[in-house]
Image (spheres, rainbow, N blue to C red):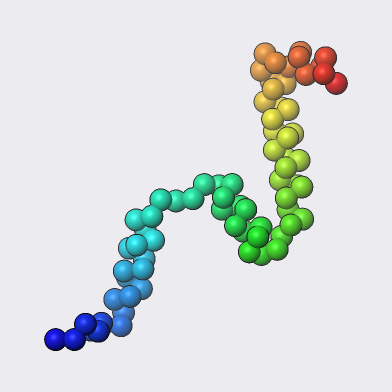
Amino acid sequence: MSTERQNPSDEPASTFAKAAGERPIGFLAEFWAFVRQNKKWWLTPIIITLLLVAVLVMIGASGGGPLTYTLF
């Protein structure tokens, strides 16, 4: 009996099953991998700016809103 694969189509199924069993990566890790792999460095300042605006909106809508006015 040989140790070779009997059916060449077994490999994609086992690769898929292995990938399905892995822990999914987070959003930021996936975004960083996308930026590095596709060389889309121009997306980084846009995303950072949008995140800062979102944080300011959340702070302004909460009880910390008056505090932000004294900082600026």
Residue 51 image point, x, y percent = 69, 38
39 relative to 71 in the view: left or right:
left
Residue 18 image point, x, y percent = 34, 62
Quarter of the picture containing the C terminus is top right
Q: Is residue 44 above or below residue 5?
A: above
Q: Residue furthest right?
A: 72
Quadrant housing residue 34: bottom right
Question: What count of labels does the image hold?
Answer: 0
Q: Is residue 16 above or below residue 58?
A: below
Give me the residue at 36% from left, 68% from top: 15
Quadrant housing residue 16: bottom left
Residue 69 image point, x, y percent = 82, 17
39 relative to 24 in the view: left or right:
right
Give me the residue at 29% from left, 76% from top: 10
Quadrant housing residue 64: top right
Give me the residue at 67% from left, 25% from top: 58
Q: Residue furthest left?
A: 1
Residue 56 image point, x, y percent = 73, 27
57 relative to 6 in the view: left or right:
right
Quarter of the picture containing the N terminus is bottom left
Give me the residue at 39% from left, 61% from top: 19
